Amino acid sequence: MEPDRIVPEALLEPLGVDSLMVLELMFEFEQRFGITLAKGTPTPRTVSEMASLMDRLRSERQSSS
Amino acid sequence: MDRRRVAITGLGLVSPFGGSLTDFFGRLLNGESAIQLLRLDEPPRPLCLPFVSCRGFDGATVLGQAMAATMDRYAQLATAAAFAAWDDAGFDRRPAGAERDDWGVAWGTALGGTLAYEKGYRELWLKGRERISPLSVVLGMNNAANAHLSIQLGLGGISVSYTVACASSTIAIGEAFRRVRSGEAPVMLTGGSDVPQAYGVARAWEALRILAPGDAGTSASACRPFSVDRNGLVLGEGGAALVLEDWEHALARGAEIHAELIGYATTCDHTHLVRPELDGQFRALRATLADAALAPQEVDYINAHGTATSEGDPVEVDAIRRVFGTGTSGPAVSGTKSMHGHLLGAAGAIEAIVTVLALRERAIPPTAHLTTVDPACGGIDHVLAARHEPSLRAALSSSFAFGGSNAVLAFRAAGR
């Protein structure tokens, strides 16, 4: 895949990141950052939503440590 | 009922020897064993057992990282074998197309994605994690293999898996055969795959006390069907696939036909979970001959179930004698699990491929390591060394499963 397709507003699905992969990525975040996502955490649909989620989780971890 | 003839136009295998189908069959004719000592170095204690591994098989290398990541190893083996069979049949791999809406898949697996489930158990109980991978369900489910095959090859008809222990893929092939023969599907992709080396699964089989012992020096000859010194079965992992096709459909596109599938029957002993019964096996053999319209004397070869257990082998030989009579004038019989091991849900498929290759190549592989036939397994024509049989016409492949399910397939050489 061309890297220039991965822009903030790009939807994940057309990039080949389907609903199962998003779930797996969210699981991976939990493992990597040692946190548990709240039940109501919205599923990211775009690259920027995914990035924001990661940023939020990282900052939450830093502030709690 | 109008019955269509059923051609076998594709064969595919993840060979335990690591090479091609031709290499695989050549090694069987030479009596070579793929069995090696496997060591599972897991807590609470390591397990060592003679086993057949597809050591050279890496799903990510063969299928690509993205596809392999959504599959347990059992589905990776299925897909690799099925792609090989599909290519062999001369079909293109593509995931869409309405013209394949009545083409289907019937797959066999005894275990499904046990490695995926076991990984989850480790996370929960060994590592104390509270959550496991969200892919666990779709990796582990028993219909994962057939689902992936339908998606990858654009098959819009039936997509189903059969879980019938050691008869899983024989029954899958047989049920696929019926779909093509009845005219419901012009093409059916079928076969089986299993991966019994999940630690808990291997330990469960060990607890049954029917696995052959062996060490690094003796593992290759650990499985000795029909032998007086047989000492149990050898498990193995693998994937094997066949493409069944309406005969006229195959002729119309100029496909090479490896052999014809002409009969199938399945019965149940209905007596005991694990003890095999003569009557159930006899009925399966006889019903298959009737379905194939074959007289006993027309059968030249039987690829036996032959697991090398003390209980199983004599019952199978009894059933063969009851159908074909006692003596060496009956069909040649060999148990090729002595070389490729017992692949559980893939056993019937790999043995169907061996049987088809025997008919095509006019050569019968032996029961390896069979030097002294157990008197309880005598009275039939055991193949002790490879035979070249120019007039080989028809052959059977049998599977007799825990649960009492028996299944037999009948094949005829193409053009003979």
Image (cartoon, grey):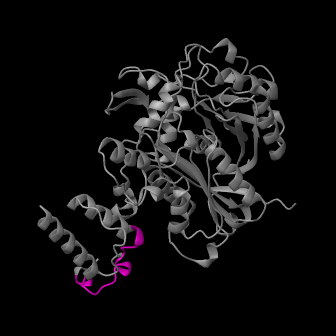
Whether residue B33 is visible: no
The residue drawn where x is 57% and y is 61% is B89
Q: Is A28 left or right of B89, judged from the image as shown? A: left
- Give the x, y percent position of residue B168: 62, 44
The residue drawn where x is 77% and y is 64% is B183
- Give the x, y percent position of residue B308: 58, 24
Q: Is B307 left or right of B331, judged from the image as shown? A: left
Frontmost residue, B253 versus B188? B188
- Give the x, y percent position of residue B1: 88, 60
- Give the x, y percent position of residue B172: 65, 50
Whether residue A65 is visible: yes
The residue drawn where x is 22% and y is 58% is A34
Q: Is residue B106 magenta?
A: no
Q: Is B196 left or right of B389, judged from the image as shown? A: left
The residue drawn where x is 36% and y is 20% is B217
In this figure, what is the number of numbered marks?
A: 0
The residue sitting at the bottom extreme is A9
Q: Is residue B369 above or below residue B350?
A: above
The residue sitting at the right extreme is B1
Q: Is residue A9 magenta?
A: yes
Frontmost residue, B244 versus B70? B70
Image quadrant assignment for residue B345: top right
Q: Is residue B68 above or below residue B198?
A: below
Range shown magenta: A4-20
The residue sitting at the front extreme is A64
Q: Is residue B133 above or below residue B50?
A: below
